[in-house]
Image (spheres, coloured by chain):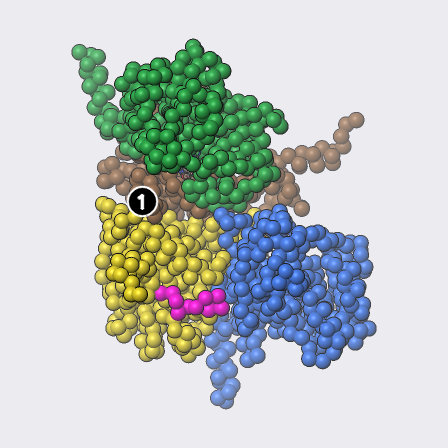
Chain colours: A brown, B green, C yellow, D blue
């Protein structure tokens, strides 16, 4: 017995369309990993099928291997963690030879995060990734110390950040989108975002960790080896949502990967409503290694409960006079 | 990284008991029990569903049993907020738990003589190891230490399983007054030990390694570095370890360990990044030197 | 039987000296309330004796009465709250006639927080408070919209902030210390702090709330009426500790009232170690109206456990090569 | 602000039961029980000791009893994370609770006829009120509404206490199909009511107030505005209320209320700051006008 049109329509309406477009980039769904919180996917693949999420965003890759900071590197804070890993990693050679092919062999989409100490290093990284097959996008981690300016982050100087973005965009293969990842610890995030877009960024990743410190009251010394660290997790979610909201308000056409404390489908929805087109799960993975899949399932459930057929219809909806844009009855 | 997939589950607490100075919790966790090999640990979420504590707490698995499809026991002392919360759990409560995690103790193929050295709660993983070794026909000798008699974990059981069991306490309330390293050499000599397994604080592991190396016998150590995820993704639990290629890397205790060959761990440099570690400032220089040597 | 000298000494050592000096200002102990989280003390007096804490820092007082933002004004966030009260209050006349005398009648020390929309308003407030008897200190809330510059906060422009501080310092009676309260959402907090000190601030209060936003995923609208709000509570503690640490490192001689997520004696200790001479309890009071007294008791306990005789010996101790400065054996 | 000092205590849960669609928790809280007057509420901390939830949850007190030195019962439906957590509490668990909070219902001096109007969980505080009124010899009539029969709280008890009890449901599953305001006028007329007490959602309170004013009888409403502290310090729970001096102020529902005289609440402006409220943009203008009038 063929189903009547109404039943077909109802059934289809039950399975929301999760595809999202970030400029030229189309993802099967909006949930990705946050850089540095998922390695290159190998550890998480023991807990869920990494091909089923939108993409794996890798730990920031550097030109040379990096040893990072000594332990202790992490301290727990209320609903957050403070960390100073210091970009430990094997360098671009090993990444391209070992990690990238492995990711692709698993059917995952690979967004590769890159970090350099100079414009030249970023250019080298963009070059190497353009030669390697299968890179879905490049995320430029700009919260990396600029060695030419005494180790200040690139984001501290919008001109320096824009220079990096421009160089990466020029070097990278034209079919590889470039996202600029920014930290909220800047004088004027909207202005910085604007500079990065003007310099050629195809999209933005917001936000990196927030500067913080924990002092161990027993040793009376800072709790992580780096002294200052980066705060992440649900504690910073309101800060991150504010950043996404403000930048989306200023540049509604620029795709944003939103992150900062996402741990549930409702959290993901909050970022989509604020204006993010994709959402990254970071610190939550430390607590629950399957968090990406759970967030995806929960998000789908939230959409079904609201009768939303296309996740894209919700992007930025908190900005609209009416909250219900694109939402079917219910 | 062990090739056995760990599982995450919501496990009901079966029993809560007190063993010496330790709280012992047994949970029903079939998937973890069946995969377990000695030396592995579990990562436990603490504080309940609405907890402000995000990082997991790690505990060595003490025992698995086939009851109820598979149970897992771990033991702990109250150190901070997470263990204080755990100490309040009661039977039927649910615990969110991941395991088994980490590289297990490698077992000898032949029935050799093994000495197992534990300090405080570090003794916990040595008990399933002792059983596994005994099943392979190995001789097992225990050397267990602690601050006081009640901190020496499971002395009775150790006596029962092992050929000999030697105890040390800081205050002399049980066995020899002093530290495990004060008596280890003698045990090795008397037991004709072929291999040493150790678990405990870093300074202890360092001295135990030195003694084993003095006797030229293999030494496997299980380290406890501060961990946040237990699954290898947060990169917080690093220890400088020399690889087979002679290069020092910042190895993750949770997936590359917690069990390492003792002589590979750069104990003197724990808590630092050695100058010549892969990716440290001095590494480049060294590798250039190597290249020069190779070229020359 | 008279006690022997040793017993007397031991007993004395058991009760740590909690007095702290912030420049000319001496407080019986370092625990005060945070502005806007304790009204003018009346509500809390139902839960504990407000004369027993270091001081009551009042809700920011304005020249005219203010109605504030409409409801909803508060949203819960993980280990924090987001709020937009909008300085609701009765204005300086009522404060001076009703609230200040009441505080003094209870034996409390009154640190009066002031907020204005222009330099003139701050001057008026400083004048009125100098005429009123019994003001222990003035805290200048600089995270208030500057009406002459389109409503941007005074802290957004270090010059504007310094101008306010200078005007208040000039106007206020010379025996009333003036503290400048700063928000962490600034381009360069250390520079701003320096400007305020140069302009005459006798001390600093760090930090005000952090900008954030919560979107209600059911209504799909911002959860508080103001849209953006201020994030406070334990979630921001690492951010606040970092601010106190950095400013104390730059100006070790400037007294700091530290705050941001303090809810236990250990939290208070963390701020003292970072360089605060006094600590304010804010959001924690919403959860536990006796939090100030509890923090004070717990802090005392922490000092006893560490064998610390004078709380002042710990101020800034995390900066010293040795954490244990001034700490007796144990 | 009520002059009765509230107390904060760690109260053991005595019983947990289900009343219609509501969870009912009774705690042992002598200090709160002895101070309680009808219309007051408790502020409950949720999520346990390590909770990421900082704001308290408010619940009207349903009943106090002298057992165990004094017990307090409150009722709730699961609305979000806090009430979900509360619904999992079991007897002997401890709850961190503050009370009694808020301005109670003022009681008439004489034995007059009172009609009590409640919507959903808003009916809860009307029950202790009904008992108090009965003790004073007042006639009590109930008008209770809810979405469905199971949401109409405690219909049986209402019938028992009151002279008459009228019910309305949205779906007609109990009593009249419709809303409490559809039947209120008739009840007032038949019962010769002298005063109205109401608790429930703002739109209901607004209509009930209009009806009471139509009959020219006093109306006391208890409002539920979002609250965070319950003690008057966070300033989050504001409602525009006209004072005796005719000036509108943003009154705190938790300490200035939750009970207000109905005609004083500017229901049309709830969720806004009225232009002429004290300290709002239009207030200055108005007060200047007043001065001008006075001067003139
Ligand atoms: C592989 C491994 C096995 C362990 N096995 C046992 C065991 O069998 N029995 C036992 O009593 N303890 C064991 N520990 C130590 C145990 O994990 C800590 O005591 C516990 O995490 C402390 O948590 P807390 O919340 O009480 O302390 P807090 O100090 O509040 O913890 C704060 C953070 O630091 C981490 N942390 C604190 N101390 C340690 C530590 N010593 N090692 C690792 N992380 C730490 C916590 O995980 C948490 O993230 C083991 C640790 C590791 C790494
Ligand atoms: C004076 C008063 C008396 C109340 N009495 C009852 C009662 O007897 N029975 C009952 O079922 N409910 C009552 N409520 C409503 C009850 O407080 C909320 O349902 C509850 O706080 C929801 O908490 P949650 O964590 O489940 O929801 P969430 O939505 O997660 O709560 C988030 C925040 O919003 C606040 N909030 C959410 N809804 C409300 C609301 N309707 N009113 C006030 N604050 C809210 C919470 O307190 C919390 O701070 C009363 C509210 C007030 C103000
Ligand atoms: C331990 C750790 C390591 C991180 N490493 C990187 C990194 O290598 N590159 C990067 O761009 N961001 C890095 N981040 C930032 C995250 O990608 C993310 O922006 C931030 O943690 C906020 O998201 P979350 O709250 O979900 O973790 C790291 C974060 C943490 C906690
Ligand atoms: C509801 C609320 C109202 C506040 N009102 C003021 C105020 O009037 N003036 C001011 O200087 N700070 C105000 N603050 C900021 C606090 O004084 C404090 O700086 C901040 O909340 C951080 O401390 P906490 O985490 O302990 O709350 C307010 C904070 C909150 C949450
Ligand atoms: S604990 Fe996270 S990598 Fe080891
Ligand atoms: S709930 Fe905090 S003032 Fe009313």
Where is residue A142 drawn, in percent x and y? 34, 38
**Residue at 60% over, 38% down:** B92
Total numbered badges shown on the rendered structure? 1
> Which range is magenta?
C43-54
Q: Is residue D55 visible?
A: yes
Corner quadrant of residue D103:
bottom right
Where is residue B55 drawn, in percent x and y? 45, 38
For this rendering, which residue is in front, B144 or C109?
B144
Q: Could you tell me which secondary element the residue under label 1 belongs to?
A: loop
Q: Quadrant of ligand 3?
A: top left
The answer to whether the beta carbon of the residue marked 1 is less than 8 Å from any atom of ligand 1 is no
Q: Is residue B261 left or right of residue B69?
A: left
Judge the density around disc 1: few (<14), some (14-19), many (≥20) Cα neighbours within 10 Å: few
Q: Is residue C19 above or below residue C107?
A: above
Q: Quadrant of the N terminus of chain A?
A: top right
Q: Is residue B109 above or below residue A314?
A: above
Q: Is residue B255 above or below residue C295?
A: above
Whether residue D274 is in magenta: the answer is no
Q: Is residue A296 visible?
A: no
For this rendering, which residue is in front, D176 or C293?
C293
Residue at image mark 1: A219
Q: Residue furthest left?
A: B296
**Residue at 31% over, 76% down:** C130
């Amino acid at each position: 017995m063929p189903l009547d049109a109404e039943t077909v329509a109802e059934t289809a309406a039950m399975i929301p369309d999760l595809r999202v477009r970030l400029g030229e980039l189309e993802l099967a769904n909006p949930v990705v990993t946050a850089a540095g919180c998922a390695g290159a996917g190998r550890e998480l693949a023991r807990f869920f099928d990494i091909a089923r999420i939108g993409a794996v965003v890798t730990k920031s890759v550097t030109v040379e291997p990096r040893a990072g900071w000594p332990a202790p590197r992490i301290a727990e804070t209320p609903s957050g963690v403070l960390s100073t890993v210091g970009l430990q990693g094997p360098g671009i050679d090993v990444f391209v030879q070992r990690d990238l092919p492995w990711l692709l062999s698993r059917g995952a989409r690979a967004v590769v995060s890159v970090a350099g100490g100079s414009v030249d290093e970023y250019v080298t990284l963009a070059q190497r990734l353009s030669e390697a097959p299968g890179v879905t996008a490049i995320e430029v981690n700009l919260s990396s110390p600029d060695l030419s300016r005494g180790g200040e982050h690139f984001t501290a100087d919008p001109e320096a950040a824009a220079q990096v973005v421009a160089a990466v965009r020029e070097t990278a293969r034209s079919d590889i989108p470039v996202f600029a990842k920014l930290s909220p610890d800047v004088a004027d995030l909207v202005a910085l975002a604007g500079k990065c877009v003007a310099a050629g960024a195809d999209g933005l990743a917001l936000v990196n960790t927030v500067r913080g410190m924990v002092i161990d009251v027993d040793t009376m010394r800072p709790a992580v080896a780096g002294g200052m660290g980066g705060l992440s997790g649900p504690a910073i979610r309101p800060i991150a949502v504010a950043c996404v909201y403000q930048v989306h308000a200023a540049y509604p056409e620029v795709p944003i990967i939103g992150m900062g404390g996402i741990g549930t489908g409702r959290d993901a929805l909050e970022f989509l409503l604020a204006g993010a087109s994709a959402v990254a799960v970071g610190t939550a993975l430390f607590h629950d290694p399957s968090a990406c899949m759970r967030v995806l399932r929960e998000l789908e459930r939230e959409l079904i409960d609201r009768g939303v057929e296309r996740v894209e219809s919700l992007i930025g909806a908190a900005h609209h006079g009416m909250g219900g844009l694109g939402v079917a009855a219910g | 990284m062990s090739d056995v997939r760990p599982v995450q589950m919501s496990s009901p607490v079966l029993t809560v008991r007190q063993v010496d100075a330790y709280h012992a919790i047994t949970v029903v966790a079939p998937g973890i029990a069946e995969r377990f090999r000695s030396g592995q640990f579990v990562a436990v979420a603490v504080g309940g569903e609405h907890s402000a504590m995000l990082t997991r707490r790690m505990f060595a698995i003490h025992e698995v049993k086939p009851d109820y499809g598979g149970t897992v026991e771990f033991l702990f002392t109250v150190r901070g907020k997470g263990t204080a919360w755990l100490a309040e759990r009661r039977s039927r409560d649910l615990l969110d738990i991941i395991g088994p995690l980490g590289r297990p103790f490698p077992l000898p193929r032949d029935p050799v003589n093994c000495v197992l050295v534990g300090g405080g709660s570090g003794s916990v993983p040595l008990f399933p190891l002792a059983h596994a070794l005994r099943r392979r026909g190995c001789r097992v000798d225990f050397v267990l230490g602690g601050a006081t008699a009640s901190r020496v974990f499971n002395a009775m059981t150790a006596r029962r399983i092992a050929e000999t069991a030697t105890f040390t306490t800081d205050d002399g309330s049980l066995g020899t007054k002093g530290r495990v390293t004060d008596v280890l050499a003698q045990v090795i000599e008397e037991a004709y030990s072929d291999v040493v397994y150790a678990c405990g604080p870093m300074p202890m592991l360092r001295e135990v390694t030195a003694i084993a190396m003095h006797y030229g016998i293999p030494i496997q150590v299980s380290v406890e570095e501060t961990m946040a995820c237990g699954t290898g993704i947060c990169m917080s639990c690093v220890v400088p370890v020399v690889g087979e290629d002679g290069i020092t890397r910042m190895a993750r205790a949770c997936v590359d360990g917690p069990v390492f060959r003792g002589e590979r761990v750069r104990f003197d440099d724990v808590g630092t990044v050695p100058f010549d570690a892969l990716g440290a400032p001095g590494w480049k220089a060294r590798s250039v030197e190597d290249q020069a040597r190779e070229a020359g």
